[in-house]
Amino acid sequence: MHPTTGQQLTRCPWLVELPAQKWGCSIYHDRPEDCRHYPVDIPQMVKDQCEMLELKDLSDQVKAQKRLDHLMTESRPPRG
C-alpha cells in the first residue's frame, strides 16, 4: 500500500533501478541490518505478502528465486 494514498502498489516504492540493470533500495542505508538482508527467499516474500513480488514470480518461483539471488548479491549474505 502506498504510505500516503493507501492505494495498492504494483512495485515497492523504494525500489530503484541502478546502473548495469541492477536494482536497489533507496532506504537501504537507513534500515536495520536484518532488514537489509530481506528478502531471503521467495516463499518468505509470499508469506509476508511482499510488494516486490510480481504475478510472474508466483507462477515460476524457481526462476524468481534466481532473479532474487542475483538482485540481492551485494545486499545480503549468500542464501544457505
Image: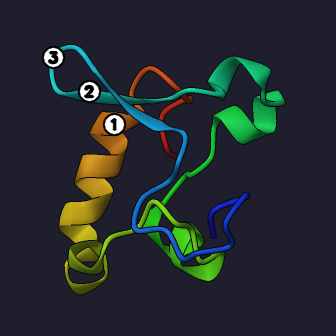
Q: Which mark is residue 46?
A: none
Q: What crowding class fits label 2: few (fewer than 14 Cα within 10 Å), some (14-19), or many (20 or more)? A: few
Residue appearing at x 63%, y 70% in the figure: 1
Q: Are marks 2 and 3 in contact (CB under 8 Å)?
A: yes
The residue wearing badge 2 is 22
64 is higher (above) or lower (below) than 27: below
Residue appearing at x 35%, y 49% in the figure: 68
Taking depth in this image into account, of 7 and 40 the one nearest to the observer is 7
Which one is earlier in the sequence, the residue at label 3 or at label 1? Answer: 3
Mark 3 belongs to which amino acid? Answer: Ala
Q: Are marks 1 and 2 in contact (CB under 8 Å)?
A: yes
Residue appearing at x 63%, y 63% in the figure: 2
The residue wearing badge 3 is 20
Mark 2 belongs to which amino acid? Answer: Lys
In the picture, measured across the screen, residue 79 lies left or right of residue 65, that is right
In the image, farthest residue toward the bottom: 59
Mark 2: secondary structure = strand
| Residue 20 place in picture, x, y as percent | 15, 16
Q: What crowding class fits label 3: few (fewer than 14 Cα within 10 Å), some (14-19), or many (20 or more)? A: few
The residue wearing badge 1 is 71
- Distance CA(mark 2)–CA(mark 3): 6 Å
Mark 1 belongs to which amino acid? Answer: Leu
28 is higher (above) or lower (below) than 45: above
